[in-house]
Image (cartoon, grey):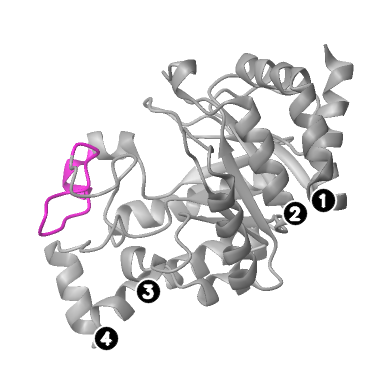
């Protein structure tokens, strides 16, 4: 199993055997890729592009995909899946980023949610396709991921990790994501399971088992939430919860775990808190055999850092 950190601040943190990721911050420029890091690209979830081009926002009968639209669970401004200028620019960006870094991890690869997109361009593309609404959306997502895979894996010769939201049943209907189309296009899969509460670990273990079954022989990586930008630490998951869910995901067969913080100092604080959870670590020794022990061994290795 591999472990990593998934941070907004681009700094090295010792103690992980997996390089850090870089994200596109909400500023007017992208962080340049680093040769010793992987690069995280949120393709259609792009707050900066949305502010610069509000006409690119994905549309629906219940309104556009702004974060303020409570009809949908959108985490950031989501652009139209078929916007030609953005699609072309992103393909060039992902290939260039892959060449200059260790590889590319993707998220926000899909339509904003159910009911999207109903802009005139999408309606015309759907009509011309002759496909059902769901199958047209599936084809748009899968074809674009095929083009992305060609740019990153075939041309840049780097690994590609396709990220999806944690819905093992209705990704197709909600987002146009059809797992069997994506598995041949990716190096490994990546599921974001961010939550500010992991107090019911069986739920997250169940999701892990579901995705392992669906992804067959393709490796599964899961990202867990520690603390994000502007969070009140009192309203984030406890260290005990994160350790417990990590071990239970490990015994369910996850191939890699990544932990999100906003800053490198917060990752170090998380490591210290994990070390201090001696009773929890002792209790978890009986969980999951070898796979669970790998998580606990990682925490033990952090003791040498402080």
Mark 1, residue position: 291
Q: If you read the primary sequence from the N terminus, does the residue marked by circle 3 or circle 4 appear first?
A: 4
Mark 3 or 2: in front is 2
- Compare residues 38 and 264 and report the one nearer the observer: 264
- Is residue 34 at least partly visible in the picture? no
Residue occupying the point 57% across, 26% down = 238
Mark 1 burial class by Cα count in 10 Å: few <14, some 14-19, many 20+: some
Q: Main secondary structure of the magenta part?
A: loop
Q: Is residue 22 left or right of residue 18?
A: left
Give me the disc on residue 138: 3
Q: If you read the primary sequence from the N terminus, does the residue marked by circle 4 or circle 1 appear first?
A: 4
The answer to whether residue 213 is above or below residue 104 is below
Q: If you read the primary sequence from the N terminus, does the residue marked by circle 3 or circle 2 appear first?
A: 3
Q: CA distance from mark 2 to mark 1?
A: 6 Å
Mark 2, residue position: 251
Q: CA distance from mark 3 to mark 4?
A: 10 Å
Q: Secondary structure at mark 1?
A: helix
Residue occupying the point 64% across, 14% down = 265
Where is residue 212 shown, x and y percent of the image?
64, 65
What segment carries the magenta color?
53-68
């Amino acid at each position: 199993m591999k472990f990593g950190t998934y941070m907004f601040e681009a700094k090295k943190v010792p103690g992980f055997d997996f390089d850090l990721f870089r994200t596109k911050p909400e500023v007017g420029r992208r962080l340049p890729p680093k040769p010793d890091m992987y690069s995280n690209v949120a393709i259609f979830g792009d707050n900066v592009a949305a502010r610069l081009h509000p006409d690119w926002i994905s549309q629906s009968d219940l309104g556009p995909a702004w974060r303020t639209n409570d009809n949908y669970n959108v985490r950031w401004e989501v652009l139209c899946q078929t916007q030609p200028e953005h699609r072309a620019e992103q393909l060039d960006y992902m290939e260039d980023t892959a060449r200059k870094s260790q590889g590319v991890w993707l998220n926000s690869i899909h339509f904003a949610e159910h009911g999207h997109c109903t802009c005139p361009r999408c309606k015309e593309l759907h009509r011309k396709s002759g496909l059902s609404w769901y199958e047209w959306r599936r084809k748009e997502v899968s074809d674009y991921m095929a083009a992305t895979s060609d740019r990153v894996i075939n041309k840049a010769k780097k690994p590609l990790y396709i990220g999806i939201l944690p819905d093992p049943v209705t990704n197709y209907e909600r987002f146009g994501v059809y797992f069997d189309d994506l598995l041949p296009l990716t190096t490994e899969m990546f599921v974001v399971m961010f939550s500010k509460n992991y107090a019911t670990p069986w739920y997250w273990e169940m999701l892990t088992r579901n995705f392992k079954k669906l992804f067959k022989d393709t490796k599964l990586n899961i990202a867990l939430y520690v603390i994000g930008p502007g969070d009140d630490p009192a309203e984030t998951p406890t260290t005990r919860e994160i350790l417990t869910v990590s071990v239970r995901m490990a015994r369910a067969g996850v191939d890699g775990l990544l932990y999100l913080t906003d800053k490198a100092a917060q990752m170090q604080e998380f490591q210290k808190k994990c070390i201090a959870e001696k009773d929890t670590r002792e209790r978890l020794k009986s969980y999951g055999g070898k796979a669970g022990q790998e998580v606990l061994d990682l925490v033990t290795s952090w003791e040498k850092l402080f």
